[in-house]
């Protein structure tokens, strides 16, 4: 479970549950948007330092039966990454495929141009400046 995250301006609060990310309008004290990612077990999410993007990582088609004491990363579903504008009304963008392996943490670099995604003993640094 990830704790709620606020945008730096305090306008939005983001939470997640399963394959859904919820964007709350803090001033209006109401749910502003639900971002549905589909049948996905969401691992983690992180808000960019400027609050204009949220990175969500998850597994599509994951089943706990796939886990063993030492699972082979190739036996797990390939992780996915969604980069979402929390203020936009558009549907969630198509996910990007990440390297095989379990999911760990996700974090933006303070400049917002690099995203770190960890899992199964490794960390991948992704250029998300574009």
Image: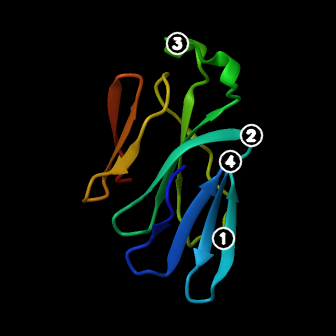
Label whose residue precedes the other's in the sequence (1 or 3):
3
Label whose residue precedes the other's in the sequence (3 or 2):
2
**Residue 16, placed above or below residue 79:** below
Label whose residue precedes the other's in the sequence (2 or 4):
4
**Residue 92, placed above or below residue 86:** above
Residue 80 position by quadrant = top right
Percent across and percent down for residue 104 are: 44, 35
Percent across and percent down for residue 35 are: 67, 59
The residue singled out by tag 1 in the image is: 89
The residue singled out by tag 2 in the image is: 39
Q: 59 left or right of 54?
A: right
Label whose residue precedes the other's in the sequence (4 or 1):
4
Label whose residue precedes the other's in the sequence (3 or 4):
4
**Residue 104, placed above or below residue 33:** above
Is the C-beta separation of discs 2 and 1 under 8 Å?
no
> Can you tell which of label 3 and label 4 is closer to the viewer?
3
Q: Crowdedness of circle 3 by 10 Å Cα count: few (<14), some, many (20+)? A: few
Q: Crowdedness of circle 1 by 10 Å Cα count: few (<14), some, many (20+)? A: few
Is the C-beta separation of discs 2 and 4 under 8 Å?
yes
**SS of the residue at dot 1?**
loop
**Residue at the (71%, 29%) spot, across then down:** 61
The residue singled out by tag 4 in the image is: 19
Q: Crowdedness of circle 4 by 10 Å Cα count: few (<14), some, many (20+)? A: some
**Residue at the (57%, 25%) spot, across then down:** 78
Per the model, the C-alpha gap separating discs 4 and 1 is: 17 Å
> Can you tell which of label 4 and label 1 is closer to the viewer?
4
The residue singled out by tag 3 in the image is: 69
> Can you tell which of label 2 and label 1 is closer to the viewer?
2
Per the model, the C-alpha gap separating discs 2 and 1 is: 21 Å
**SS of the residue at dot 3?**
loop
């Amino acid at each position: 479970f990830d704790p709620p995250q606020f945008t730096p301006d305090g306008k939005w609060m983001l939470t997640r549950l399963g394959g859904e990310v919820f964007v709350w309008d803090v001033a209006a004290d109401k749910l502003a948007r639900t971002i549905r990612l589909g049948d996905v077990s969401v691992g983690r999410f992180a808000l960019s330092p400027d609050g204009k993007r949220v990175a969500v990582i998850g597994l599509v088609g994951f089943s706990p039966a796939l886990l063993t004491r030492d699972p082979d990363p190739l036996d797990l579903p390939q992780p996915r990454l969604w980069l979402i504008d929390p203020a936009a009304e558009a549907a969630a963008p198509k996910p990007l495929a990440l390297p095989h392996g379990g999911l760990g943490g996700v974090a933006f670099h303070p400049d917002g141009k690099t995203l770190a995604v960890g899992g199964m003993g490794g960390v991948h640094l992704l250029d998300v400046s574009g």
